Amino acid sequence: MTVLTVDDLAISSPLQELKAEYEAATGATLEVVRRPFGELFSTLTADLTAGTGRYDACIAGAWWLGELVEGEYLRPYDAYRKDARFPALALDQVLPAPRRLLAYGRHLYMVPNDHDGQVMYYRRDLLADPAHRAAFQKAYGYALGVPATWEQFHDLAEYFNGKDLNGDGQPDHGVVLPLLTGAQGMFQFMSLSASFVIGPSNPHLYWFDPRTMKPLIDSPGHVRALAVLTELVKSGPKEMLQWDLGKGWDHFLGGRAALALTWGDLGALAQQEGSRVRGRVGSSQLPGSREYYSIPEQRWVRAQPLNRVGNTTGGSWAGVISRFSKAPEATYYLLALMASQPKSEIYAARGWDGIDPGRRYHFLPPRGTGRIENYTAAGWDRADIADFLQAYHDNYSNPLQLPYLRIPGAYSYWLALDLHLVEAASGQLSPEAALKAAAVDFEDITIRLGRERQRRSYRASLGF
C-alpha cells in the first residue's frame, strides 16, 4: 500500500511512525513516497489520469477536492466509516468549519488529519508592558490591548515598528507578513479580507457569482481589504516581499515582530528550542471590520456587533483514496488509524508535524475534552497554549466562514491573485488596479477550463 505525500519530514513523520503498527494489524506493506510541494499534485494527477494505481492514497490539499472528485478519480469512504473492522472515526468531533471540507457533494472523501486556519499572533509581553501602554495611550487615544479591528491591528503594528522588541539594541518591526510570489502569501489576503466581504447578509459570495462565474475578487470589499494590507506592509521589514513562510516565521520567533497572521505552525514553533518568544505569544481569532460590502445588495453594511469571519485557509492536508487503488480497505485502515483520537491528540499537541487542532478533544474544557497536560508534556507554555486553543476554537466555531475554493484550477486562480497582490504591496499598482487585473486573469482561467464546468463545480462546492 503506497501513500504519496509532500517531501517534508515533519508532515510525513506520522506515516512513518505508524508503519510497524499498521503492517502488524493488516499484513500489508506500507511504502511512503515523498515529492516536493510543487510536484505533489502533478505526480498524483499523472497517475490518476493514466489509471495505473501506483498510489493508493495521497495526503492531499483540500483545494484539490473539486478537481479530483469532478474527474471521478477518488473513492468515497462512506461505506467504511462505521464498519467495526476499521479504527473508529468520530467525525462529529471535528468542528463545523473544518468538517465541511471532508465532503464534496453527498459523499465523504477526505479522512480528517490536519485542520488549517489562520489566526492572529501577538506578543503578550509587549501589550502588558506599562511603558508601552502609556506611550500607546498617549499616541492613539485608547488603551493598548489585543486588537479587535483591523484599524487597531494597524495602529499596533505602526506603534511597535522601529522599536527594539527583543533587547538586542536593534530596531524591529510591527508585523511580519511574508509575501513572496508563489509562496502562499495570497492566503494571508484571503483571511484578512473575509470580514470586509462576508457578513450576515452575504455568507457565501466571495470568489464568483454562482450563476455566471463572473469574478467577484475586485469588489469594493476586496479592494478595501487590499488597501489595509498595503498599509500594513509599511510596518514590516521591506525584505518580507521576498520572504517565504519560513523566513517570516523565523523573524517572529526571533522576537523581531509584534504581530503576525498565519497558521498554527507558528504557535507550535514558538515552543521549540531556539525560540525567543516562548511564554510570550498570545493568539486570537483574526480582527474584524465595522462594515462589510454585501455583494448581493451592492452596498456597504454597518456591522452590529463587529463583523468577524472565521477561515479554513490553507491545505488542511488529509488522506484521499485513489479510485484505482488495488487495496482500498487497507488504504482506508491506515488513514483512519492516523485520524483516530489517540493518534490525533498526540499530533495536535506536539504541533511540529504540521497537524493543527480542529476536533473537540483537542480543546480544553469547557470548549472540549482535551487535557492541558498533553500540551505541557509536549513543551507548551501553559498561557501560550490556552490562548492558542481559544483562538482556534473561536475561529472554527464562527458561523460566518470564508468560503473555501474547491473547483478545478483553484490553485491557478490563487496564483494569479498572488501575483497581483504583490504588485499592490510593492506599490506598482493601486489595490483597485491590482484586483481588476486579477479578475481579468480569473475570467481567462474560467474560459480555458470551461465556464459551465466551472459553474457546476462551484455551485456543488458551495452546497447549492
Image: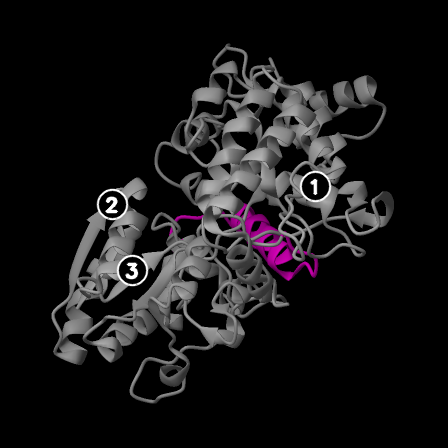
**Placement of 168 over or under 132, stated as above or below:** above
Q: Earlier in the sequence, mark 3 or mark 1?
A: 3
Looking at the image, which is closer to me, 302 or 355? 302
Mark 2–mark 1 Cα distance, whole angstroms, equals: 34 Å
Residue 217 percent location from the top left of the image: 64, 40
* Circle 2 Cα neighbour tier, 10 Å, few/some/many (<14 / 14–19 / ≥20): some
Residue 240 percent location from the top left of the image: 48, 21
Residue drawn at 70 percent across, 41 percent down: 287
Q: Earlier in the sequence, mark 3 or mark 2?
A: 2
Which residue lies under the disc numbered 3?
58
Asked if residue 185 can be seen in this view, the reply is no
Mark 3–mark 2 Cα distance, whole angstroms, equals: 12 Å
Number of the front mark, 3 or 2:
3
**Placement of 15 over or under 190, stated as above or below:** below
On screen, residue 403 versus residue 374, left or right, reads right
Q: Main structural element of the magenta stretch: helix, strand or loop?
A: helix
Secondary element type, mark 1: loop
**Of the numbered discs in the image, which one, if any, rests on residue 7?**
2
Q: Earlier in the sequence, mark 2 or mark 1?
A: 2
- Amino acid type, residue under disc 3 in the picture: Cys
Number of the front mark, 3 or 1:
3
Which residue lies under the disc numbered 1?
287
Please check the rendered image and state whether residue 117 is part of the magenta-colored stretch, yes or no.
no
